[in-house]
Amino acid sequence: KVAQNELDALVLGRNAQPVTGGDCRYIRLESIQAFLQQAGKVDDVVAQTDNPALRYLLSLQGTITQSDALFRRRLGQGMVLQQSFPATQFGRQLADVAQVIRLNLGIPVFKVALGSFDTHRNQKPLHARLLAQLAEGLMILRAELQQAGQWQNVLVVTYSEFGRRAAQNGSGGTDHGTAATHFALGGRVRGGHLGQHPDLSALHDQDMLYSTDYRQLYQTIISRWWHRPEIALGGTDWPLLDLLREGDRMV
């Protein structure tokens, strides 16, 4: 049984922007253990104020103390992961995610980061190393959650702020472009390639032309994973992607 949500999202690493909208209750931290060491120093304050800035700070303080109590209460059960995650920042983030999922803490969204894909120079070796880190980490996460019987309840999706141009620049890298590939994996993901392969002979201002709007991916997740079809991104009826198999999902 999943615990009732006390947090809407857990952000590990940098950039919490994807979960900062509305009244989303989230915390951003480098690791759970580091958070527990620091959060214990924050006192729980119950206060009322009409000052919006102070009210916001008090809400943050409350989120920290509630999260601290949640993690300490459940992590005290002594969860031991079955897989050996890479000893990298990305690997440690995935290990924390796997631990929280296995403990059924009721947190529905996790955001992790693997940076330095902005490869303006020397792209070939750097890109290969980063993709290897991504692949290794996600395969170990998959094995851990399969063993825990949770893989069917997980959807992993990548995103990026920008794509890359098709042609190499003078520094052995690529500059910002308009199209990019997203990866999705999970127990209910159909697999395969969605969309059209880019035509490298039909570029616009040196950029590839995308065939699938990224909002179609997000709308598919909202409608078919979160089961909230009444929410339309930008008020537009985006065509959904054939991404997910039908079936029960933990909510």
Image (cartoon, rainbow, N blue to C red):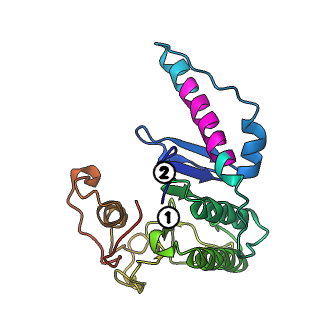
Q: Return the x and y of residue 189 as percentages of the image width and height.
A: 41, 78
Residue nearer the viewer, 7 or 14: 7
Q: Main secondary structure of the magenta part?
A: helix
Residue 182 spot, x, y in % from top left = 47, 72
Q: Is residue 185 above or below residue 42?
A: below
Q: Residue furthest top?
A: 50
Question: Is residue 31 among what the camera can see?
Answer: no
Q: Amino acid at mark 2?
A: Pro
Q: Which one is nearer the viewer's eye here, 153 or 237? A: 153
Q: Is residue 236 left or right of residue 4?
A: left
Residue stretch in magenta: 58-72
Tell me: 80 left or right of 148.
right
The residue indicated by pointer 1 is 159
The residues tagged by marks 2 and 1 sit, at their Cα atoms, a distance apart of: 10 Å
Does the rendering let one see residue 59? yes
Please say whether residue 64 is one of the residues in the magenta stretch. Answer: yes
Residue 13 or residue 37, whichever sits in front: 37
| Contact flag, marks 2 and 1 (Cβ < 8 Å) | yes
Q: Is residue 52 magenta?
A: no
Residue found at x 34% / y 83%: 196
Determine which of the numbered discs, if any, sits on residue 18 in the image: 2
Is residue 21 depicted above or below 149 in this figure?
above
Secondary element type, mark 1: loop
Q: Secondary structure at mark 2?
A: helix
